Image: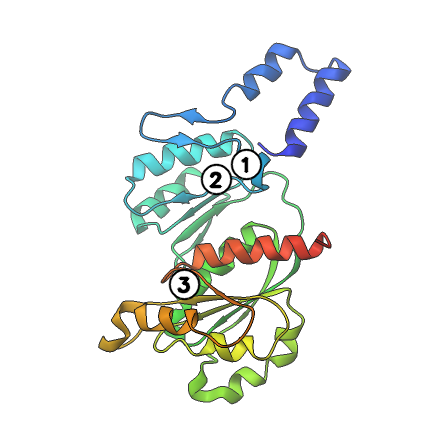
Amino acid sequence: MNQEQIRQLLEQVASGNLEPDKALEQLRDLPFENLGFAHIDHHRALRTGFPEVIFGQGKTREQILSIAERIIEHGSQMLATRLAEDAAQALVERFPQAEYDTLARTVLVPAPQTPPQTGLVAVVSAGTSDLPVAREAVVTAQAMGAHVEEIYDVGVAGLHRLLAYREQLQKARVIVVVAGMEGALASVVGGLVDIPVVAVPTSVGYGASFQGVAALLAMLNSCASGVVVVNIDNGFGAGYAAALINRGAGDGT
């Protein structure tokens, strides 16, 4: 439940169109709801502007469905990430309006009233192998209200490909750069723009990449100012951070 929903609820009570007990029933699960195996944070949208997101990895299909049902019943959008195929299919069958991204392994059920996407977040990947992580960032940022443009397979092995998108990059409010191997693309992009760059190391690469540790260390040691780094393969975290930056830029803050 977000601020606008609570405002409407209070206005209905004030106007006499809703009994206080009915309003109390809708508010009874704030700030959280205990399902035994999970405490659902229904208060999160009020605090942060965005509802709780389900991290699907390690959860059973039944647990994911139960949490999703309660989030949606409270009028919030529902985003679930890192889903096994059976759990994703179960969500799609339960919620016909669900949007399943097989590459990102996400399912999004939009809220009944979804505001238009604003601003511009650019998501850039070094290679096609980085797309699952990049798509997770895209889906997350879009779910959080950002307009997203995708630029894929423009790694440093063919730098001219990236330079062809330089004007598009400079129009963004924030850029997410997803790269494995040696992770050099984040530094290159950071040296071309005057906006924040959220770098995402991926576990893509040969043996000495150490499942993304090489890219992580390279990004952390970038000499390009304005580059910040999230964890290995954390497309969700990058998309979320980018959406927050995008929202703040739109507010003039």
Residue type at numbered disc 2:
Glu
Question: In the rendered view, would you say 147 is above or below 74?
Answer: below
Q: Nearer the viewer, residue 56 or 95?
A: 56
Query: Disc 1 vs disc 2: Cβ atoms closer than 8 Å?
Result: yes
Say which residue appears at 47% left-offset and 42% top-offset.
96
Give residue 25's mark: none
Given the current orientation, which residue lies at the most extreme left position? 207
Query: Looking at the picture, how far across and down is residue 63, in whole percent?
Result: 32, 35
Q: Write down the residue under mark 3.
A: 133
Quadrant position of the N terminus in the picture = top right
Q: Considering only order in the chain, which callout, 2 or 3, is on the residue closer to the N terminus?
A: 2
Query: Looking at the picture, how far across and down is residue 243, in whole percent?
Result: 57, 55
Q: Nearer the viewer, residue 113 or 246?
A: 246
Query: Looking at the picture, how far across and down is residue 38, in whole percent?
Result: 35, 31
How far, Cα to Cα, is label 3 from label 1?
25 Å
Q: Nearer the viewer, residue 225 or 39?
A: 225
Among the 4 quarters of the image, the one containing residue 148: bottom right
- Graded by Cα atoms within 10 Å as few (under 14), some (14 to 19) or many (20 or more), the crowding at tag 2 reads some
Asked if residue 177 lies left or right of residue 204, the reply is: right
Residue type at numbered disc 3:
Val
Query: Disc 3 vs disc 1: Cβ atoms closer than 8 Å?
Result: no
Q: Nearer the viewer, mark 1 or mark 2?
A: 2
- Graded by Cα atoms within 10 Å as few (under 14), some (14 to 19) or many (20 or more), the crowding at tag 3 reads many
Q: Write down the residue under mark 1.
A: 76
Residue type at numbered disc 1:
Ser
Give residue 52's mark: 2
Say which residue appears at 46% left-offset and 27% top-offset.
32
